[in-house]
Image (cartoon, helix red, strand yellow):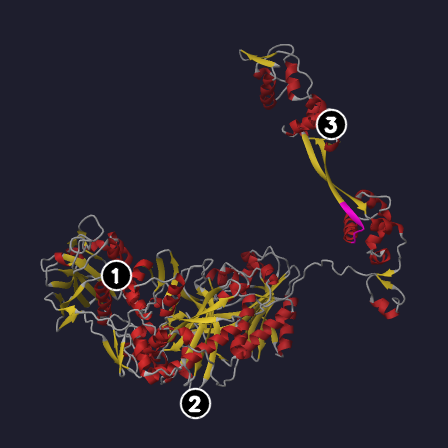
Amino acid sequence: MPNIIISKAVLEEKLGKSFSDEELKDRIAMLGTDLDGIEGDNIEVEIFPNRPDLLSEQGFSRALSSFMDIKTGLSTFDVLESDYKVIVDKSVTMRPYTACAVVKNLTLTDASIKELMNIQEKLATTHGRRRKKSAYGIYPLENIHFPVNYIAKDPSTIMFHPLGMETTIKASAVEELHPKGREYKEVAKGWTKYPFFIDAKENIMCMLPYTNSHDTGKVDSSTKDVFIECSGTDLDNVKVALNILTTTLSDMGGVIHSVEVQYDKESIITPELVPTGWDIDIDYINKRLGLTLSEKEFQKLFARMGHEYKEGTILVPAYRADIMHQVDFIEEIAIAYGYENFNAVIPNVNTVAKEDDLEIRKRKIANILAGLGMLETETYNLTNANNQNEKMLTDINLITLKSAVNTEYDVLRAWITPSLMEVLNNNRSSEYPQKVFGIGRVFKEGDTETGVLEQERLAITICDEQADFTNIKQTFDYLMRMLDIEYTMAETEHPSFIPGRVARVTVNDKEVAYIGEMHPQVLNNWGIEYPVGVLELNLSEMFNL
Amino acid sequence: MDIQKIALSLHPLERKVVPALKSHKILEEIMDHTGLQEVEVTRALQWLENKEALKIIKTESETINLGKNGLQYAKEGLPERRLSAELKDRDKSIQELTFVTKEEAGISIGQLKKAGVISMNQGKLHLEKELAESLEEKFIKKSFPLELDALEAQEKLAVANLRKRKDILVVDKIKHLSIELTDIGKELTCCQIKDDVLERLTPHMIRTGEWKGKTFRPYDVKINVPKISGGKRHFVREALDYSKQVWLDMGFEEMKGNMVQQSFWNFDALFTPQDHPVREMQDTFFLNSEGKLPDKKIVQAIKDVHENGVEGSTGWGGKWDEEKSKQNVLRTHTTVLSAKTLSQLKEEDMPKKFFALGKCFRNEALDWSHLFEFNQTEGIVVDPDATFENLLGYLKQFFKKMGFEKARFRPAYFPYTEPSVEVDVWHPVHSKWLEIGGAGILRPEVVVPLVGKDIPVLAWGPGIDRLILDFHKINDIRELYTNNVDDLRSKKSWVK
């Protein structure tokens, strides 16, 4: 989630008075943004992804001033009509939607330009899903000749001067040469054509989703009027982005003008800054919260959150992207009411506790083994084929992970013993005997909804100069007597064990365990210099749970 | 101090040593006199010192012996002596020298030139005057070993100079131990020590009654004993079991389930949009396999809620992709178990409370503050009459039982809850708020497709690893799974 830095001085100017750091900290946290800290003039705030409208200083102070009862209620934004027109060509199938606006009479400073860049970038990262869903461009109006065309073209046929580069290059080279091209080329995977905004005089305005043109898309402090496009794969998404950007510019002092966006079959006029109306049931909200607020109180609380409520209908400002359901107004009321003002009450409802049966048995087993002087270990479910198979001289089918960041942990374990061998290897300089055990999940292919069968297993290793089949069998036998489970043992073969010193254990006609002395080659592979007695027991099978 | 009482408590070794102390004060002499080993005598002396019967005096002396070169020089003379002797008859060039090695010549020439004993003339060395006998020369002719402390000032100077030269002297540090009796000690050595005290109580004594009428030697009960260690549960397990007990105390029923889950349950059923960043490979572990979706009815319900919302909501819009929801992942939260549980729940069974405790995963590089496996615990309350106030009530009680008296609640955001809560608990030691976990009421977009009806489901899922790190003062999160046996043996028990 993105962090933004807000100037305390700017914020206080917007709020109209000054506050102590403590007061601000408290109010900012209670508004539903995560305050990282205040240092000097810098207030660092983490904005949750449901509130992209708070990503700018303007949007943030708008919400805070309302929340702090300084300027409450619905903010309205006028949109003046205009003749500006954007024509969407059928070819932009990869990003078929755009919403555009013009904002005039701006007074931009280096600081406000930087802020604009920032919000544009952060909005594209969150709301635009790292530009995958949408990306946005702001252009000085004076360079643009309308109508503007939004059209997809083969990039090898287009030459333009990307923003931030020295010269004109072929558009097909942007992914290689331009920093944003390199950063976002995943977005355009598989595209043969790319969307461009091209003005009436054939000037390239931008190549999407990467960069504006230097010639027509460079905003500086001399810029008074701007053209904005928000383009992407989802119409609602680009409309909301445009609403957030235009209302921010309006708060900076700009005057918003509409643009006609002409699609193949119909035209739309953007931005639409008319508040959205919702019918809500205040009884539902009261019940969910456990409150009994009156209509009047609802009015006041909604105003505190920047809405306007009247007789069952609420008007929501157009920059709010997160309202999807009535339930979202519950949180608006809860925040306005103040989380700190709720009573914390446990209802008088009777339910019966129940622990999982296998979990109960696992805990019993662990306690029995601890009573024998053994140490319980906790090891990772993720490991690698070298540990699970190569070092163990086995060839077990393993469940693999796709693109694990750590290549040493790219499979799910099929048995626990290798994890304990790793523990023994890590403890070669500690005192012996080392008697350790671990209970954990193992994974193999199976007939389940995911195709993966998961079971719980116990493994025990006794590592000592005197360790042998007898003492691991004694341990196992003691455990089974304590659990009152009968078992039989039969000779078997297993590549990890010394031939003739390994047994298969059967309980209720099911083979549930291997027990034996670890093969010296396996010990060599793990760098272990003392004999090791091993038990690996399938608890899920044995308890049939 | 009662001398008789001390005398009575003497260990057999002390009993042997004490009489010797009357006339012997030095370790070696005491050993000779008692016939005991060094370690036995020193232990006895240590115990006697604890009883304030004596004071142990440890001194160190340095003994000087001749080294390899020193032995040779004592016989043949120092290199500078030999060089000056060789030049007595005639001047020689360096190459002509035979009394000294090349290396020795190198050092001696410089030294003798500086002292004005020789000079260099057209490549030949010339003796200017007789070399006087130096302190060092005199010193190496003495008989060794010598005690450094016993030397005269001039000899000490010679030692200091010779020690700068290679292998002439070897100086060994020798430790000496002697004692000085205190008043108690003096009395102790004089008094008659009773000999017939009983040491270890034996089965034989018990059977025969041999102990009757005799005295057991009193032990020093304050003495330090060697540490032992026992078998133990892992400290992470201990903490997890503790939090499980908290859930059980509050009347919750345990949910269990697989770590490998379909995206359908892990994400889609929890209303996580299909283009959400958490569903990308760099955040979540995907498997190289896919699963089989549950029955059509629930798949259709989830599809509808994503595309069109539920009960007047808007949904995420766009097309919901069935293929994407089949992808197997390692569960990213235990909330997936809540979703599955809700899908099985019948209205007549409500109200119900469930909890889960288990490993969750994120595809993350391993370092001191990041692990790809983490423990999450999670609880849900399915209660048609539950309210936000109740959620806060449960949370407060839960964290109180987890050992935090004070909790505060802040607004937060999670895709599947509304309202959402971030819980901070007051850390009494660090005197600050500790962010401990998220909570909320599940959105109707989650509940309606699973349960069939918009019923309040309170949910919270604190991470537990942070509390374990804090309790055991661990800074590197990887230490939770290092399994160093010494460390496991010495970890304190989880008591909250």
What residue do we see at 22% from left, 71% from top? A76
Give the residue at the far bottom of this rendering. Answer: B348
Q: Quadrant of residue B125?
A: top right
In the image, taking residue B267 as reference, residue B250 lies left or right, namely: right
Query: On what subunit does the disc labeled 1 rest?
Result: A
Q: Quadrant of residue A201?
A: bottom left
Q: Nearer the viewer, mark 2 or mark 3?
A: 3
Residue range in magenta is: B51-56
Out of B179 and A103, give the one closest to the viewer. A103
Residue B152 circle label: 3
Image spot of residue B208 (x, y percent):
88, 69
- What's the CA distance linking mark 2 and mark 3? 104 Å
Residue B23 in the image, given as x and y percentages of width and height: 86, 44
* Residue A120, numbered circle: 1
Give the residue drawn at x 69%, y 22%. Answer: B135
Q: Secondary structure at mark 1?
A: helix
Q: Nearer the viewer, residue B257 or A388?
A: B257
> Residue type at mark 2?
Glu
Q: Which residue is mark 2?
A: B348
